[in-house]
Amino acid sequence: MLTLSEIKNSLLHLFFPHVCDGCGSDLLNEASRLCIRCVTSLPETNFEQHAGNPVEKTFWGRLQIVYAAAHFYFTKESLMQHLMHQFKYKGNKDLGLQLGRMMGHALKSSARFYNINALVPLPLFPSKEKKRGYNQATVLCEGIAEVFSLPVLQDVISRPQHTETQTKKGRIERWRNIEGKFQLEKPEATRGKHLLLVDDVVTTGATLEACGAELLKADDVQLSIATLCVASR
């Protein structure tokens, strides 16, 4: 005979099914948003391990960084695009936290990111964050922080001016659209620190470049960059 606990769990699963956010399978750990099959099929870059990787090269001659990496490749009509859509636009914060933890473990496996002092999420325009309910970069930082035990500095830089969407703009247009749109709010909170600036996707790098340049205005700051994905071109 079934125990009361087994009956309760069966009913909970019937009315509140715990299924994979990637494929809908119910063969997954209760603490995970993704099944093993989806986790292993995500296209890792391993950029964390390599100096001069494509993300670092994106910023050469544009921004003084120590290291840079993106954990996954992003392509259209892919599993990663599906997960990103759920995370950014469907309120799936738990999925974002898990993706952030995955970033954290990848970064921690590399000796190149061991001396980071604090995490800085790339800020959203306030009205967009209010509409979405959270800043996806902050959620990723929270996941990374669980692995690294580092502070997340959410209020050291702001994005007070609204910008047009960057989606269909080229590199020069993106830079013109974003230039001067970030503001360093608390330089004393970042002074002397090695900061890890975090965002969800890097394409041309214009937004991260503008934000990073503003962070570097504080005294004795070192800057590295980590994103969840890099857009395939």
Image (cartoon, grey):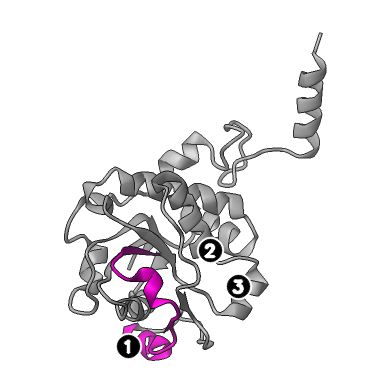
Mark 2: secondary structure = helix
Mark 3: secondary structure = helix
Separation of residues labelled 1 and 3 (CA atoms): 26 Å
Q: Residues within 10 Å of mark 2 (few under 14, many from 20)?
A: many
Point 40% across, 50% down: residue: 103
Point 33% across, 83% down: residue: 171
The residue type indicated by label 2 comes to Gln
The foreground one among 191 and 173 is: 191
Q: Earlier in the sequence, mark 3 or mark 2?
A: 3
Residue 70, percent from left and from top: 34, 58
Q: Earlier in the sequence, mark 1 or mark 3?
A: 3
Q: Marks 2 and 3: in contact by CB < 8 Å?
A: no
Point 19% across, 73% down: residue: 60
The answer to whether residue 6 is seen in the rendering is yes
The residue type indicated by label 1 comes to Ile
Separation of residues labelled 2 and 1 (CA atoms): 25 Å
The answer to whether residue 42 is seen in the rendering is no
Q: Magenta part of the protein: which range? A: 171-198
| Mark linked to residue 172 | 1
Residue 202, percent from left and from top: 37, 68
Quadrant occupied by the N terminus:
top right
Where on the picture, by quarter, is residue 59?
bottom left
Where on the picture, by quarter, is residue 190?
bottom left
Q: Marks 1 and 2: in contact by CB < 8 Å?
A: no
- Seen as rendered, the residue at the extreme top is 1
Check residue 137 for magenta coloring.
no
Return the residue at label 3: 129
Separation of residues labelled 3 and 2 (CA atoms): 9 Å
Q: Earlier in the sequence, mark 2 or mark 1?
A: 2
Instruction: Say left or right for 75 vs 27.
Output: left
Return the residue at label 2: 136
